[in-house]
Image (tube, rainbow, N blue to C red):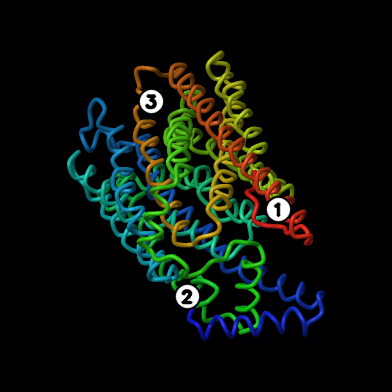
Amino acid sequence: MTTLSDAKATEYMNDDLSSGVPNHARDDLERRLVRKLDLRMSIIIVLYALNFVDRANASSARLATFEQDLHLQGNQYATILSIVYVGYILMQVPANMVLHWLEKPSILIPGSMVIWGLVSTLTGITKNYTGILLARFFLGFVEAPFYPGVLYLISGWYKRDELAVRTTLVTCGSVLASGFGAVFASGVLTGMQGKLGQAAWRWLFYIEGGATILVAICALFILPDFPHNTKWLTPEERALAISRLAEDGTDELGKRTTMQGLRDAVCDWKVWWLSVALIVQFVALSFVIYFPTIVATLGYDTMNTLLLCAPPWVFSTIVAFVISRYSDKAQKRYVFLFASSALAGVGFIISICTMNTAARYTSVFLMAQISAAYMVIWGWINNIFAREPAKRAVAIALINGLSQAGNIIGAYVWPIAWGPTYRYSYAICFAALGGSTTMFGVMYLHLKRVNERMERNERNAKDINNLPNPVGFRYLV
């Protein structure tokens, strides 16, 4: 945490930056700082892509001999998909509490990545249902520190009106991996069958797990820590990084301990409300883990099916960047969340109503862009808990961890018996999307009322004390 000497040095440098340096010089320094930070953070795109691929490669393997070789029956495949989220849920909060205490994301995040890469690689040697079940459980357990850790890391560097775009930037790796991971899988599944006596799906786990380990080692030397303890910042950059967060109302570094942050998060009803809303949202997003299966209903062979998985996610990435950029620029969240959800709802309705190939393929584009709403949601959550790092660390992990229960439920929403139309599955997703969007709407109305109350209180204080109207912290809604 920041020491007293650090605080004094920062105060001195902030004074120097504000009084001794022209505004345009400070603006130039801030642009260089953000650009430098963006370049470092951009490796998270690759990390998140590998995170998603290692968790979702069972979906691509299913199109090969995965189920037959492991002798899976009934709901065992769905259980394999869902069990990963059990370990994921259990480790979320402890991992982010350790991250807040240790203050070394550059070590914790790549370290967990090396371990899950090893687990993913070893998944390829499993022989039966018990083996794959254990491997998937431990995969979720060691992947747990990654996403909440990344969200906490970026919230410790960027201002509130920068978060949605940066959340999209670091998260788009998973969106692209949804498509291009399938393209890569198609090459492995069609070209590696029988190599060295191994089934092609086993090579999929070996190759992707090995790539994860190599990239994680590189990330150790690239990822930053936090503004006060990142070594590659100059003194001026460190002072500016800390002061700009303070000016934005997001920096109260060191005022609460990790355990106090846990208590604050657990006692805040907003944490639980957002957790439930995201649980319902993840049920609506369950189509993602069955995406190759859904595209396979178009009637093409395995290779073409996996190739057709890519374009919807490219479209989704473009939409996500456009929506998140305008969300930051307008400093609004819910209206953009609602727009993306409405488009996804149209996609679900089309799939419910027709088996026409062109219409159903169009519908998966509309469904895939729901990732834009998901990224705006996380930018919003970081805004809501912006003022206290200890509480934010736990809140992010708790919300993300509990929300994974939606993935456990969602794994059972797409039984083979409901195919190839999957109308009941789409209907469930549509209903869940409506429920989650409504819950986020309630949060929007609440925060809007809180902002209005703060504005009234500030106006009253101005009238009583005859002082300029102060501009305090505001929730982005």
Please tell me which residue is depicted at 53% across the width and 76% down the height of the picture.
228
Q: Name the residue under label 3.
A: 413
Q: Is mark 3 on a helix, strand or loop?
A: loop
Q: Quadrant of the N terminus?
A: bottom left
Residues at marks 3 and 2, CA–CA distance in whole angstroms: 41 Å
Residues at marks 1 and 2, CA–CA distance in whole angstroms: 46 Å
Looking at the picture, does residue 381 appear above or below residue 157?
A: above
Q: Is mark 2 on a helix, strand or loop?
A: loop
Q: Which amino acid does label 3 sit on?
A: Val
State which quadrant residue 354 falls in.
top right
Q: Which amino acid does label 1 sit on?
A: Glu
Q: Mark 2 points at which residue?
A: 221
Residue 418 position, x and y percent, is 39, 17
Which mark sits nearer the N-terminus, 3 or 2? 2
Looking at the picture, does residue 411 appear above or below residue 323?
A: above
Q: Which mark is residue 139?
A: none
| Residue in the foreground of this view, choosing between 375 and 243 | 243
Residues at marks 3 and 1, CA–CA distance in whole angstroms: 49 Å
Q: Residue 458 carries which label?
A: 1
Residue 39 position, x and y percent, is 61, 67
Please tell me which residue is depicted at 20% across the width and 38% down the height of the picture.
129
Q: Mark 3 or mark 1: which is in front? A: 1
| Residue in the foreground of this view, choosing between 73 and 391 | 391
Label 3 CA crowd tier, 10 Å (few <14, some 14–19, many 20+): many
